[in-house]
Structures are given as structure tokens and as C-alpha cells.
Amino acid sequence: MGSSFNAAEKVVVVDVGSPPVSFSVPEAILCSTSEFLKAKIKPEWSQEGASIQIPDSPADAFSLYVNWLYDRSSAINAGVNMVMLASAYVLGEGIMDTAFKDTIIDIMKGRIFSDKHRAVLAIDGVDIVKTIYEGTPRGSAARKLLAHVFAFRASVGDLSAAFDSAPKEFYYNVALVARKPVDVGMSYAFLDTIEKCSYHCHQGKEYCYFGL
Ligand SMILES: [Zn+2]
């Protein structure tokens, strides 16, 4: 009891972005799901009183992350746009937070596959693709989701709008999905019944953020 109380009281400063914006977060909250942040506060990796630096991520993505750490159910509302969600996913990749990444990708998946948000590909498709391809490695779950979305949900206009600025690898991945829909088990019907863990990075059901 005593040690958890002390951990909750200790505040860690995280400097995010460039120029940096400082966030002060109780250690126990900050380090609840991120492997990167857990490692950073270990004595052998940190100097006493030093802040943690995350220069490559935008401060508003980290702000969203901190809100999510405090309140997982309502931190990410309809006001958070798709480009910001992509940016948050990239942050989750960088700080190695599987629960956060899986949460974000489910929201992205829900919006992209709903007819209500159909226009998102035309409006933000290029920026979403660029953000995910610049910030996640080959084979990432987010790249996989985008390949499925563009292969099965995008219009010709959506694809051509992205053509000049999206990376070649993106089109390659879309083509791979689209050319063998039977082999990979993808179809409109399949997408309607897509499994809840389809784009999650965790191994095994017990680690799904749904159970946190
Ligand atoms: Zn899952």
C-alpha cells in the first residue's frame, strides 16, 4: 500500500515536441502501459530529477495520450480528427504502448468503415497515409488497416488524390490486398464482420486493452 501511494505521488516531467511542451504526470499513471516510459524511469536509465524527452511527437498527440491514461473511456471523443488519431498511433508506436495503439486503431477502424465517415478518405486520406507510413515500420497494424481500407472502401478519386504524395510502398500494399481478395479472406462481407482484435498488436486475448 505504502509503496503504491508513494509512486502515485511522484511526478515525472515529459518534454514533448519541438519546441518542447512540458507535461507533469504522476509516475504511476504515466508508466501504466508504455514499455518505453517504464524503461525511462528506471534508475539505470534516468538521472534524478531529469525530464523524459520525446522530441519527435507532437504535443497535442501526447496530450491526448495523457487524457487517455487518466480516463480511457471518454478521452478520445468525436472531436478528435483522423489525422490526430494517426498521429496518436505513431506516438503509441514510439513509446511502445500496445493498449493505446489498439485503442486508437479500433476507433480509426470504426470511423473508416462506417458510412457516416465515408468522406474521411477524401478529406484526410493523404495525411493519414503519410503520417502512418512515416511513423510506423513495415508490416505495422496501421499500415495493414490502411491497405484494407483503400483496397475495399476507397473510391478511384480517393486513390488518385493520394497518388502524387503517398509513398510507393502504400500503393504496393493496397495492390497486394486488392489482387487476391479470396486468398486473404477479404470481402465486403468479411469487413462487416471483422474480428475485434484484427488490428491489435498484443499477443493472446489476455492482453487486450478491452480487459484492462
Ligand atoms: Zn485485442
Image (cartoon, rainbow, N blue to C red):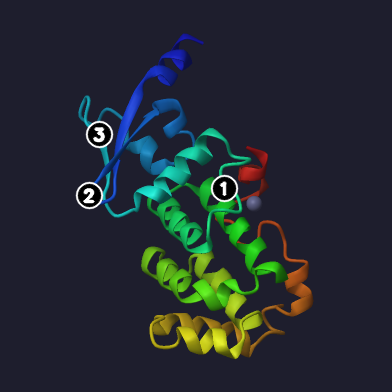
Look at 55% across and 78% down and name the residue there: 122
Q: Position of residue 177 (x, y in %)?
A: 60, 82
- Determine crowd level at label 2: few under 14, some 14-19, many 20+ residues with C-alpha closer than 10 A: few
Residue nearest the viewer, comparing 158 with 186: 158
Q: Which element carries disc 2, helix, strand or loop?
A: loop
Q: Relative to 18, is 162 on the left or the right?
A: right
Residue nearest the viewer, comparing 140 with 168: 168
Separation (CA) of disc 2 from disc 1:
25 Å
State yes or no: Cβ of the residue under disc 2 lies below 8 Å from any atom of ligand 1.
no
Disc 3 residue type (three-letter)? Ser
Disc 1 marks which residue? 76
Look at 47% across and 63% down and name the residue there: 83
- Give the mark, 2 or 1, whose residue is nearer the N terminus: 2
Please give the count of numbered marks on the rendered protein: 3
Looking at the image, which residue sits at the far top? Answer: 2
Separation (CA) of disc 3 from disc 1:
26 Å
Disc 3 marks which residue? 51
Q: Relative to 57, is 117 on the left or the right?
A: right
Compared with 126, 168 (above or below) is below
Q: Position of residue 62 (x, y in %)?
A: 40, 46
Q: Relative to 173, is 119 on the left or the right?
A: right
Q: Nearer the viewer, mark 2 or mark 3?
A: 2
Separation (CA) of disc 2 from disc 3:
15 Å
Disc 1 residue type (three-letter)? Ile
Disc 2 residue type (three-letter)? Pro
Q: Which mark is residue 166?
A: none
Q: Which element carries disc 1, helix, strand or loop?
A: loop
Q: Position of residue 188 (x, y in %)?
A: 75, 78
Q: Nearer the viewer, mark 3 or mark 1?
A: 1
